[in-house]
Image (tube, grey):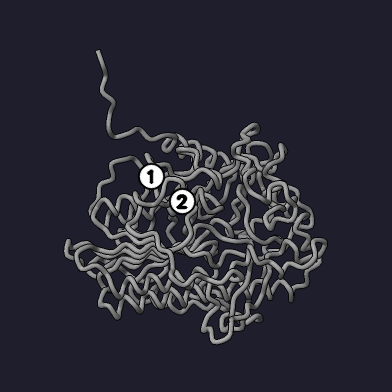
Amino acid sequence: MSKNNRPHIIIFNPDQWRSDVMGHMGNAAAVTPNLDRMTATDGVSFRSAFCQNPVCTPSRCSFMSGWYPHVRGHRTMFHMMNKDEPVLLKTLKEAGYFVWWGGKNDLVPAENGYNDYCDVKYKPSRMPRRESNLHAHDVWRGEPEGDNYYSFFAGRLEKGEDEPDYYDGDWAHVQGAIDLIRNAPADRPLCIYLPLLYPHPPYGVEEPWFSMIDRTRLPARIPAPAQWDGKPSLLKGIHERQRLQGWTEQRWNELRATYYGMCARVDHQFGLVMDALREADMYDDTAVFFFSDHGDFTGDYGLVEKTQNTFEDCLTNVPFVIKPPKGTPVQPGVRDALVELVDFPATVEALLGITPNFTHFGRSLLPVISGEQDEHRDAVFCEGGRLYGEEHCMEKGSTSSTNSAGLYWPRVGLQIEEGPEHTKAVMCRTKEYKYVRRFYETDELYDLRADPGETVNRIDDPALAGVLAELKDRLLTFYQETCDVVPHEPNMRGI
């Protein structure tokens, strides 16, 4: 344990990893031995963990603050955490932690700098080669009129001569974290924040991970609907624009296996960091948090990538694995309790004995980790989209908004139109049902027991009228409970 008797903290945060791609979740094609081992021996993995927005920035703002996106309007890629708003990294730095941040941002405005949030915003001494950025180096796309142009499918990546790995930003930051562990400051506890890029598409990975996935063991995809009746118009629009309707199942399996290989690579990198902790005799004294910001379609519904205001489980259900420090009660294994990523900062605070000086809506997961309780929440929530006229929420600053050559044009190009596609929407999900309130188009209601793929919208089914009324009331309660936050410090009243 560190000198002030507080545990070290590892926040391992891959981007766009869907929850079902882990071996211990029963997926025979997934290769995740390190996460599986931690779950079996000294950690807990939450089967039903959900993010609060299905794209990067709003989700990160939420899980670093404990606020839902609607509390302060963090529901676009361009509205990040301002200096007066709470961020867990800042809290930890103020509590005496040596905070090291290695990886992507998508959390705080770059113009404000990083000094408030970390001691080190890591820049590797050996810079990744340009072609390791598959967004910038996109020769894999082919011709603009082809059916691979918007697929994000790059496939097997070729390593350079004498390179053990395809050296990109993730490898650079993982190695930087390992170097820090080997040379950790003796007088302060560590917080290592590793927001990696993988398995965010483009879908591409080097050997041995590309060939590691057994294509014959991949679970079945959720097929694209024959008709899109009852489904969000954004999904239909993206499906038409991505032009993947003619793909064979073999091609889909190659794309999916590549994504699984990307996840396997991240699991391997996670294992390297855990090994470094063991070698430094720090593992027992470290709290480890592994979770993703959101998921990925990966072929489900005939789509790739993600959306900003639809809430299919493949997008909203994320991995969430926690290993507490030695001495904190834990019953290892998989838990079925409904949890949210807003519960992450509350759990850290409970471990450290920190009382936040602001109101947030997370709940500590320590009682579930210890086995003291089996249930945690009766419902989970996710939200996105905008109102008509909210041009500042259209993300027009994205190069893909008006330029059809952009990778994200099938989705982002629809978000800047004044149709219903980018409608404000919110999900209320229980273990058995999912209700989605959509402001400008048909609401959604799914019986998850009979229809786990969310293919049949039963919003008008009289047999579920009672369920619908209960979920609408639960959604109203959610908004009333979380509609604002009052500062803990009152203003002085003058005479």
Residue at image location 62% in from the left, 50% down from the top: 310
Q: Nearer the viewer, residue 378 or 242?
A: 242
Q: Mark 2, residues whose alpha carbon is within 10 Å: few (<14), some, or many (≥20)?
A: many
Q: Secondary structure beneath disc 1?
A: loop
Residue 244 point in image, percent of width and height: 77, 63
Q: Are marks 1 and 2 in contact (CB under 8 Å)?
A: no
Residue at image location 64% in from the left, 43% down from the top: 396
> Of the residues shown, which amino acid type is indicated by label 2?
Leu
Res 383 → quadrant: top right
Residue 200 point in image, percent of width and height: 57, 64
317 on left or right of 378: right
Res 205 → quadrant: bottom right
Question: Which mark, residue 107?
Answer: 2
Residue 194 point in image, percent of width and height: 42, 64
Which residue is the site of mark 1?
361
Q: Which of pointers 1 and 2 lies earlier in the amino acid sequence?
A: 2
Q: Nearer the viewer, residue 364 or 352?
A: 352
Residue at image location 61% in from the left, 64% down from the top: 201
Q: Measure how far apart labels 1 and 2 are at the Cα level.
A: 19 Å
Q: Secondary structure beneath disc 2?
A: loop
Q: Is residue 232 visible?
A: no
> Of the residues shown, which amino acid type is indicated by label 1?
Phe
Q: Is residue 471 visible?
A: yes
Q: Is residue 437 above or below residue 98?
A: above
403 on left or right of 146: left
Q: Mark 1, residues whose alpha carbon is within 10 Å: few (<14), some, or many (≥20)?
A: some
Q: Is residue 207 above or below residue 378?
A: below
Question: Which mark, residue 464?
Answer: none
**Foreground: disc 1 or disc 2:** 2
Q: Is residue 487 above or below residue 202?
A: above
Residue at image location 55% in from the left, 74% down from the top: 27
